[in-house]
Image (tube, rainbow, N blue to C red):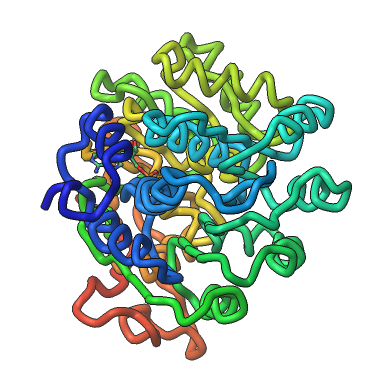
Amino acid sequence: MTFDSLGLAAPILQAVAATGYTEPTPVQARVIPEALAGRDLMVSAQTGSGKTAAFMLPALQRLTVPHAAHGRGPRVLVLVPTRELSAQVTKAAETYGRAIARLRTVSIVGGMPYPAQNRLLQMGVDILVATPGRLLDQMQSGRVDLARLEVLVLDEADRMLDMGFKDDLDAIVARVPASRQTLLFSATLDPAIVKLAGAMLREPSRIEMQTARTRHDHIEQRLHLADDQGHKNRLLDHLLRDTGVNQAIVFTATKRSADEVALDLHAKGFAAAALHGDMNQGARTRTLQALHRGRLRVLVATDVAARGIDVHGVSHVINYDLPRQAEDYVHRIGRTGRAGRSGTAISLVNAREHAQVRVIERFTAQAIPVTVIEGLEPRVRSFAKPAGPSRRPPGRSSGRPSGKPAGRSFRQGR
Ligand code: AMP
């Protein structure tokens, strides 16, 4: 399939050709024709699947013709959970919209100084990319007029719900024209998302992507058992010395441990830095730029801060701490294996995190093999199996897709 067959207008096809994409990704092939037909859509697609272009290209198509009504308000609004994702979506809008005359894309996110934001809004906007909280602030002070809105996109809707944006989303959606088209994207279409879609979308088509990429078959996953934090540090040091690691993102559970691990790695001579929500926007932007430019080899980050990072050089994701939510595991490992490349995701797991491995395996329906590094073997060779009548073996848990790997006993690979 080619992009030409999807029904996109010439200026958009021209911009897509300039990016070097030769064919649409599966989510783009499914979403673009339906979105161009004007339908509301609820789509499950992982980050890395090409979902941004899947909603941005048809949204841009509307902007190739002038709006009937004059005004300065946006015609396309993309709501995103984080600043990083906002930056990425804004960049995509500019890239794919570069052949459209006088297109203005503005990003409105929390943490950005108001005066600069207010000036941007005054100049008029076609595409507004925003985090819900700050957008609502700006709407309440009368700086954003959504009367001309044609397309509303909810990107990573599951994450927006997780981050407590439900009320803000309700308040924003209540103030956009009912005639709009709404496109909702989420990693999974779980009941909370379907309920949200029921309230905000009109007779939506449901598109669920189940491709190798969403199953992360292109990402090799493995785990190492660790006795304690000192052991985790030694494993991390060893893993990062591997020349096969081009760039890595190391995930920690807290901002504090992100700082500690980054400092420790820096002291050991790695080009490493932390990224988390306590850093100011300037520091975050500089760190991300260093990662993009390859000056930083190891980024130590928390979940929220690393959300949406799209750096093709990231060959490895290392979970220094396991995430609390299985969804976050999927988002984390999706930071590698970008744009058709393969990647490696390694988890360092101590006894306390053991049960969480099973939760993650059940969620992804994929077993994560345990591996051992010679000289860095754990003292405890396997974790005890869960005991007691209340614990069902994972293979019999409800809701697990059939035919997928069942939970395995937690033993070492060799
Ligand atoms: P996303 O899932 O939107 O975060 O996109 C993941 C990555 O895939 C981004 O780096 C895009 O630039 C890239 N990408 C999007 N569409 C295509 C395509 N049709 N062919 C190749 N790469 C693509």
272 or 309: nearer the viewer = 309
**What's the residue at 28%, 54% (across, down)?**
28
52 or 81: nearer the viewer = 52
Residue 369 percent coordinates (x, y) = 26, 54
Left or right, 398 with reference to 368: right
Q: Is residue 350 above or below residue 202?
A: above
Q: Is residue 242 above or below residue 96?
A: above
Q: Is residue 311 visible?
A: yes
Residue 175 percent coordinates (x, y) = 74, 64
**What's the residue at 26%, 66% (across, down)?**
210
Residue at the right extreme, as displayed? 141
**What's the residue at 45%, 23% (across, down)?**
298
Q: Is residue 401 above or below residue 106?
A: below
Residue at the left extreme, as displayed? 1
**What's the residue at 43%, 36% (across, down)?**
92
Residue 89 percent coordinates (x, y) = 49, 40
**Which quadrant contains ligand 1?**
top left
**The image quarter in which residue 173 lies:** bottom right
207 or 293: nearer the viewer = 207
**The image quarter in which residue 317 lies:** top left
**The image quarter in which residue 302 lies:** top right
| Total residue callouts | 0
Q: Is residue 225 visible?
A: no
Residue 390 percent coordinates (x, y) = 51, 88
373 or 239: nearer the viewer = 239
